[in-house]
Amino acid sequence: MAFSTRFLVTVFAIILFISPPSAGAITCSDVFKSLSPCINYLKTGNGPPPGPCCKGASTLASAAKSRADKQTACGCLKTAANSIRPKPGLAKSLPGKCEVSLSFEVSPSVDCSK
């Protein structure tokens, strides 16, 4: 259970870290609103993630531009992930399925402070 929730946090943290720096302020409400369409898919889905999930991930990546925004979003996800039990394989494949290119491997060991 703990591994799965950490994995979900990691996937979304990585999505956050791919956007360029800029000013702004993100809240947990913003994070939850953007990623709520992904929850059912990550828990039970197969095939491609729903369009609203990928759109939400993209919206969040665009909104969380500064380092502080990314750290806040990551912390929000850690808090929310305690109640979510995603399938690790679905979480790992989400960036690719949403056509988000990453230059590093998705890992549950992402440190939100960096």
Image (spheres, helix red, strand yellow):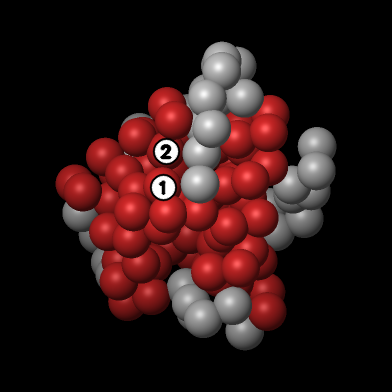
Percent x, y of residue 8: 55, 62
- Secondary element type, mark 2: helix
Q: Give the mark nearest the N terminus, 2 or 1.
A: 1
Most foreground residue, 27 or 58: 27
Determine which residue is flagged by label 1: 30
- Secondary element type, mark 1: helix
Q: Is residue 79 visible?
A: yes
Q: Is residue 31 placed above or below 60 in the rendered structure?
A: below
Quarter holding the N terminus is bottom right
- Residue at image position (35%, 35%) is 59
Percent x, y of residue 110: 74, 49
Of tags 2 and 1, which is closer to the observer?
Answer: 1
Q: Is residue 15 placed above or below 80 in the rendered structure?
A: above
Most foreground residue, 66 or 13: 66
Q: Which mark is residue 60?
A: 2
Q: CA distance from mark 2 to mark 1?
A: 8 Å
- Residue at image position (56%, 59%) is 77
* Kind of residue indicated by mark 1: Asp
Percent x, y of residue 33: 34, 54
Is the C-beta separation of discs 2 and 1 under 8 Å? yes
- Residue at image position (56%, 15%) is 22
Percent x, y of residue 112: 74, 47
Q: Quadrant of residue 90?
A: bottom left
Q: Is residue 97 visible?
A: no
Label 1 crowd (10 A; few <14 / some 14-19 / many >=20): some
Quarter holding the C terminus is top right
